[in-house]
Image: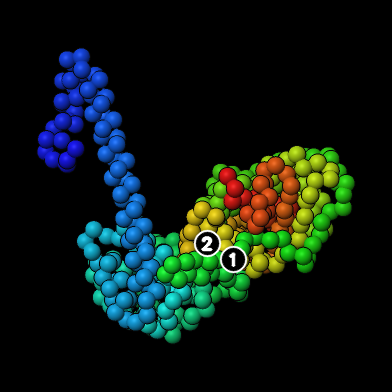
Amino acid sequence: MNDSDEDSRRFSWQTAQQRAAQGDSRQVADLALELTDRIETVAKRKREHEHQLAMLVRVLAIAPGPDSLTQLLRLFTRNQGPGAGLAPRFVASLLAEHREAADLVGPLSEHDPKGRWDELRICLLHELILRDVDVDAFVKTRDWTRVLYGGHPLAWLPRHRSALETRVSFPSRSVNSSARSVGVTLPTEGRVDPPTPRTGEQSALIDSATLELHHMIIAAPEAGRWGDSEAWVFRTDEEVEPDRVPALLPTLPMGCVEGLGATGRFEIARRPADAIWSLLFATASMGGMYHRGAHGAYGRFWAWKSLAALSDAPAGASPEEVEHHARRTTWFHFESDAEWFHNDSFTDYGIAALSPDRRRIAVLAATDTD
């Protein structure tokens, strides 16, 4: 059936009412089914076009020389605005991977009165910062955030790469292929596995995580579209020494250790704060097996937010305050054979954080198998 005024009349609400009133409900349903088929066809075609657009954008972003960049920016000036294949965070990630900062700053600093490059600029800024580019050396980059981004979430991030951000992993992409790190593995160094058999007695501590805090703790795996993630927060009446945490965690009322028993595999290691940030960043930025993630700029943002919530940083804390808090927190990385985890290669992990006052234990569990 062709798209025409006649089609519109056939599918009009008034016509449907008339047919139904005449007892011709079957024809109304047939028209509805026909329209459903048309919608599915259009949606499939749209997905195909978006995939083709993404491939063409990748070619322009990766191709060397100034003209390909000029043509790529031209796409962002179209009146209808960027489509799915022109997601600014995706394009910024590609540009930062394949081009020198000096070649990007000039063209992207040109006059853009309608602000169509705004999101691309701020995403690119943080992609460059993560790659340890001194953006202050490029005076024009200050204009990318000075006026337009007072309320933008990425404006909260530090303008220089923090000492927590030294273990940064990026995907490696060409026109026809992509590669990334193999995933999550528990390190051999810092292992503090509790002896088995462990106690079978469950702790009396109660999860106190609010809905808001829960969402902030799992922000990184949510941003990376991992299969599932959960969070718990336990507060204690007395200080908990770090050496007690490995044996305490399997006894807590958490789904990620439920049914583990006294001898099920529970492996755990103490980790520095920068290793935890790196794990959260990789989770958010590169995503799970079936999703390409939030990319560098937003991956950076959500890694910081998860870190802040896990370490009990005050609400509204600056990145500097979050870093100070995170460095005083005792961090653990663990794996478990409990049923909640699927234990496929490199797709499960748990993080536990003992707060600086040693009276709060926060836990994040993530799995990329839903």
How many neighbours does mark 2 have within 10 angstroms: few (below 14), some (14-19), or many (20 or more)? many
Identify which residue, 2 or 191, lies in the foreground: 2
Q: Can you identify the residue that label 1 sits on?
A: 181
Q: Residue furthest top?
A: 23
Pointer 1: residues within 10 angstroms few (<14), some, or many (20+)?
few
Res. 286 mark: 2
Task: Mark yes or no: residue 205 visible.
Answer: no
Task: Say left or right for 39 vs 328.
Answer: left
Say above or below: 344 vs 155: above
Tell me residue 74's x, y (percent): 26, 70
Which residue is depicted at the point 30% across and 43% down?
41
Where residue 146 appears, as percent x and y from the top left, is 37, 72
Pointers 1 and 2 in contact (CB under 8 A)?
Answer: yes
Residue for point 29% across, 71% down = 73
The amino acid at mark 1 is Ser
Whichever of labels 1 and 2 marks the residue nearer the N terminus, that label is 1
Amino acid type, residue under disc 2 in the picture: Met
